[in-house]
Amino acid sequence: MSNVISSLLSVLRRRDKLSDEEEAALRGLSWTTSQFAPEEEIIAEGSRPSQSCLLVDGFAGRCLWMNDGSRGLAALHISGDFIDLHGLYLKTMDHSVVALTECAVAFVPHGELRELMARFPHLSRMLSLLLAIDAAIERQWIVGLSRRQAEDRIAHFICETYQRLQIVGCASHHRFSFPLTQATLADLVGISLVHANRTVQHLRSSGLIEWNGGDFSILKPDELARIADFDPVYLSLPSEPR
Amino acid sequence: MSNVISSLLSVLRRRDKLSDEEEAALRGLSWTTSQFAPEEEIIAEGSRPSQSCLLVDGFAGRCLWMNDGSRGLAALHISGDFIDLHGLYLKTMDHSVVALTECAVAFVPHGELRELMARFPHLSRMLSLLLAIDAAIERQWIVGLSRRQAEDRIAHFICETYQRLQIVGCASHHRFSFPLTQATLADLVGISLVHANRTVQHLRSSGLIEWNGGDFSILKPDELARIADFDPVYLSLPSEPR
DNA sequence: CGCTAGGTTGAGGTACGTCAAGCTAAGTGG
DNA sequence: CCACTTAGCTTGACGTACCTCAACCTAGCG
C-alpha cells in the first residue's frame, strides 16, 4: 500500500518540499484501491461522493455529456492526479470521471482529508495548488480551443502531457506510453476523429512524432514546442515555498 | 470599507452558512482598494503577487496572450469574485487579469489570508470551493468550445453570466447591466467579432434577447436555456455544509 | 474463418474566419 | 454651430478549416 501515493508525492515534491510528518500523514490515510476497465465510470455525474480519489495508474478523463449524446472530455488525468478533490468541495458532481484505459484508483474518505487539511495548513495549500494547476491547464485548453487550430492544439496537448508524465516518472527521453485511441484524442482536443487522424498523420509525416501501438515518441521536441507555442510556466514546475 | 466584501459574502453564503466569527475574520483583514480603467492590467502575467485580490465592482477577464499577438480570454469575472486566489498558490502568474470595464478591486496580503485559512478550516474549504467552481465553469467552456456552435455558446454564456450576477444582486427579472463590447464578447466565447455580431443579431431577431447600450434583457429565458443546454448544477448553487 | 476495434481515405458540405467597406452616435476642437 | 475624429456596430463577398457520411483496409482474436 505504501507505493500507492508515490506518484502523488512526486507531484507535490516537484512543487515544494514536504516534511516527513506531512508525508507520514498522507501515507497514514486509510486508502483503499480498486481497478477500473476502459470506459468504466470512476465517478458518476450527479453523484455525491463521500470519498476522494487518486489516480494511481492509467489514464482517465473528465467527461461532460452533451444533449446530442456526444461526450466532451474537459481534462486528461494521469498517474498521481488527485482526481476528485473537486467532489470534496462541490458535493454534487457536475461531470463524470471515466477510465480511458485500465485504471488503478485509490480512495480516501472526505472526512479524513478534511481533518488532515485542518491539521496541516501547508499540506492543505499544496492540495489547493493541485486544484489551481488543474484550472491553469483548463485555461490553456480554453484559449487553445478558441485560437489554435487542430495541429497546433494537438502539438500543445502532446507537449503538456509529456511534461506531466515526466514528473511522475512515466516519461523520459521524449518517449512515453500512450495507449489511447485516436477517437479519444479527438475528444480531448475537440475535433472530429477523421480530422484528428489526418492531423496526426501530418505530424508523423513531418517527422515530428512517432505513435505506434501505444508508444509515443517526440522526435523533434523543439520544433513541436515551437508550433504549439508551448510555455510550461502554467504547470508551476519550480519547487518553492507555497 | 465594510461593504467591500459584501458581494463576496453573498457568493459564499449562497453555498453554505458562514458563522459570525468567520464573517468578522474576513472583514478584519486589511483590505486596500483601488480603481482600474478598462483595458488596464489588474495582475500581470509573469508577476509574483504578494496580495490576493477581490473584484468589488465591474467586469474583468483572465487573459492569455498568443504568439500571434491576439489575446484569449479564459474567464469572465464579476463583482464578488476572488480573482486572485490562484496567485496565492501558483506564485508566478501564468496569465494576466485585465479590467474589461471600470473596476474596483480590493487587495489583501497573502500572509493574512494564509493565517486566516489556518485558523478557520471551514473558511479555507469555502475559498477552495471558489477555486473549484471556477474550474467547473472552465470545464463548461471547454466542452462548449469543442462541441457547441456559436449561437448555443453565446446563449450558454448569457445563462451562466445571468445566474452569477443574480447571486451578488447585480441581476434580477432577467435583466442586468452588461457594458461590454461585442468584440469582448467575441473574445470570451472564442469567435470572430463579425460572427459574434451576426449571432447576436440572430438572437435578437429571434426575440430571445435585447442588448442596447449596456443593458441586457433575456426575453425568453426558457428557450434560451433550451438552446444553450444550460444546467446550472456546475455552479454549486445549493446551500449545504461544505 | 469471420468478427471487431481501430485506423485510413475520399467527396462534399458548412460554420466559421478574414478582408474591406460603410454606418451611427458620441465626443472634440474651432 | 459645424467639421472632424473615433469607437462600436453592421453588412457583403469570399476563402478555409473543419465536419459528416461512407467506404475500405488492417491486425488481432475467438
Image (cartoon, coloured by chain):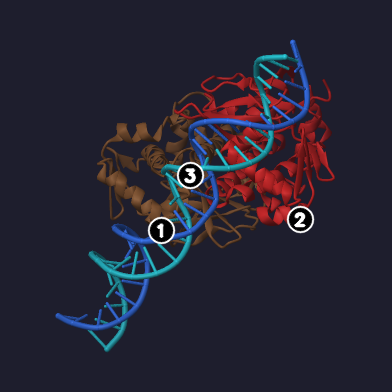
Chain colours: A red, B brown, C cyan, D blue
- Percent across and percent down for residue B4 are 44, 48
Q: Which mark is residue B81?
A: 3
Residue picked out by circle 2: A222
Residue lying at 76% horizontally and 37% vertically, measured from the top left: A11
Q: Are marks 3 and 1 on the same chain?
A: yes
Give A99 or A92, whichever is nearer the viewer: A99
Residue picked out by circle 1: B102
Q: Secondary structure at mark 3?
A: loop
Residue D11 picture quarter: bottom left
Sort mark 3 into few (<14), some (14-19) or many (20+) by Cα contacts within 10 Å.
Answer: many
Residue B182 picture quarter: bottom left
Residue lying at 71% horizontally and 38% vertically, measured from the top left: A122
Label 3 resides on the chain identified as B
The CA distance from mark 2 to mark 3 is 38 Å
Decide if residue A69 is in sight here.
Answer: yes
Q: Amino acid at mark 1?
A: Glu
Give B135 or B193, whichever is nearer the viewer: B193
Q: Secondary structure at mark 2?
A: helix
